[in-house]
Amino acid sequence: MENNRITVDIELLKKYDKPGPRYTSYPTAPYFHEGVDTEVVISHISEDNKHIENSDLSLYFHLPFCDTLCYFCGCNMMVTRNQDKIEQYIDYIEKEIILLKRHIDPDRKVIQLHWGGGTPTHLSPDQIRRLGTIIHNNFDFRENAEVGVEIDPRELTFDHMKALSEMGFNRCSMGVQDFDPKVQKTVNRIQPEDITRQTVDWSRELGFKSINLDLMYGLPFQKTSSFSETIDKIVSMNPDRLAVFNYAHLPSMIKHQKLIKEEWIPPREEKLQLLKLSIDKLADAGYTYIGMDHFAKPDDELTVAMNNGTLYRNFQGYSTHAGINMFAFGITSIGMLSDLYVQNVKSLKEYYDKIDKDQLPVFRGVALNEDDILRREVITELMCNFRLRKENIEKKYKINFDTYFDTALKDLLHLEEDGLVHLNKEEIIITNEGRLLIRNVAMKFDAYLRKKEKNKPKFSRTV
């Protein structure tokens, strides 16, 4: 996979551009249900304490607060400038940690921590230190732990970054989306180049090992000429990783996206040209296409893991740590055990009420059956490492691959004709061009998409 330059065929993208899951989990979130409660979660944690192969932990903290509303945002967030409200939330995060921690084997150590949002840096520097201290007082960390945070350059001070560094953070990710002033004004995210560059410089000064910048294509009034300038400016900042996301316009599901008028959004052809431009320019700049919107330098851990066949995918995106439990804290956060996904309640009131009753703030989830676990591994292998050896799956799950996945393999023949996959007796290999449409490949192995349902879930488009 060292030479992974992708030729972007616009007509092929048009052909396969349709709604589909992003596969941060399988089964995907629309199939979570409210039959998962505190007792179910505790039971699954107990089993994993005894039987999981890799006992290391991943921790995720959802910090939902923001200073302003970005109209394109699809995250679970709320706008507040009330510091007491944030302090109260941290109080309850600590209580949730204590509730959950009593069920986790104390010998298990943290290898990965992530703060997402919302805007984690909407917390004050002292609040960052407070929450960080709470976490470190309750969990033991490995020396080589990946500790990442999402930051917003717009309201950031050096003391914010210093506080994060003091709390052990060594990776950061920040949204940029587009530097074009008209685009920024339309989506209500005014973020000049200079403060973004300053944030990158601060991160380097404080020794952050990895810096990621997020861009977004398909936003209102975007044009290839101005977006090309944005990419040039981003490349000049020399981030270790980049994510280039497709703006998913779903105003029926995300009410504030109604502030973005349909006629402002680039036509389909223009949107695909923006994607092509991004891929071509980042390849020219020496970045490796990891897959599913992500790019990294050739010596980055993600690129190395992809080339070694050890890349993994979870709710935070691509990761180098496979097969570990992820415990999630805060409203709407999603955790992952060996055979269970679990999501917390959505509102602060519900969250506080459940914790006050000494209950885990569980809202819904799904326990995986044997078929789910098998298909999850197949989908993960294809999405992360772009090559699947049938023999490995057959030995592990005691199946005949071609018989079990007969329908999926027949469906893949059409993708093979278009040059997206190579099929043979031993392997399924995703071509460079196929990696751009990997969601379409994964969908062929998704048993839930084959179900006939009256109210089918709504997904973003695959391109």
Image: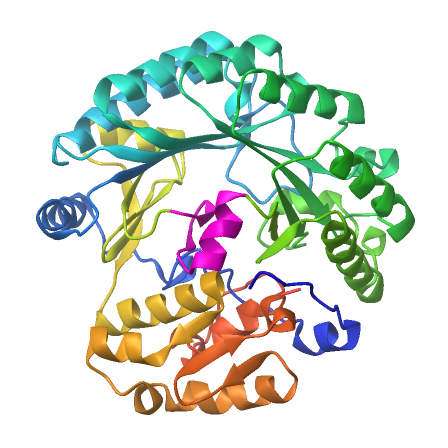
In the rendered view of the protein, which quadrant contains the C terminus?
bottom right
Relative placement, left or right, of 111 versus 221 is left
| Residues shaded magenta | 300-320
**Residue in the image at 18% along x and 43% along y:** 38
Q: Give percent across and percent down for residue 241.
A: 60, 41
Q: Quadrant of residue 58?
A: top left
**Residue in the image at 24% along x and 40% along y:** 56
Relative placement, left or right, of 238 versus 347 is right
Given residues 316 and 201, the one toward you in this image is: 201
Given residues 108 and 260, the one toward you in this image is: 108
**Residue in the image at 75% along x and 47% along y:** 285
Q: Quadrant of residue 421?
A: bottom right
Relative placement, left or right, of 195 versus 18 is right
Q: Give percent across and percent down for residue 378.
A: 37, 71
306 drawn magenta:
yes
Q: Give percent across and percent down for residue 35.
A: 23, 56
302 drawn magenta:
yes
Mark yes or no: residue 447 visible. yes
Name, please, the residue furthest toward the right: 225
In the rendered view of the protein, which quadrant contains the N terminus?
bottom right
In the rendered image, the vertical position of residue 86 relative to residue 381, given as above or below: above
In the rendered image, the vertical position of residue 324 relative to residue 145, given as above or below: below
**Residue in the image at 49% along x and 86% along y:** 423
Q: How many marks?
A: 0
Given residues 394 and 331, the one toward you in this image is: 394
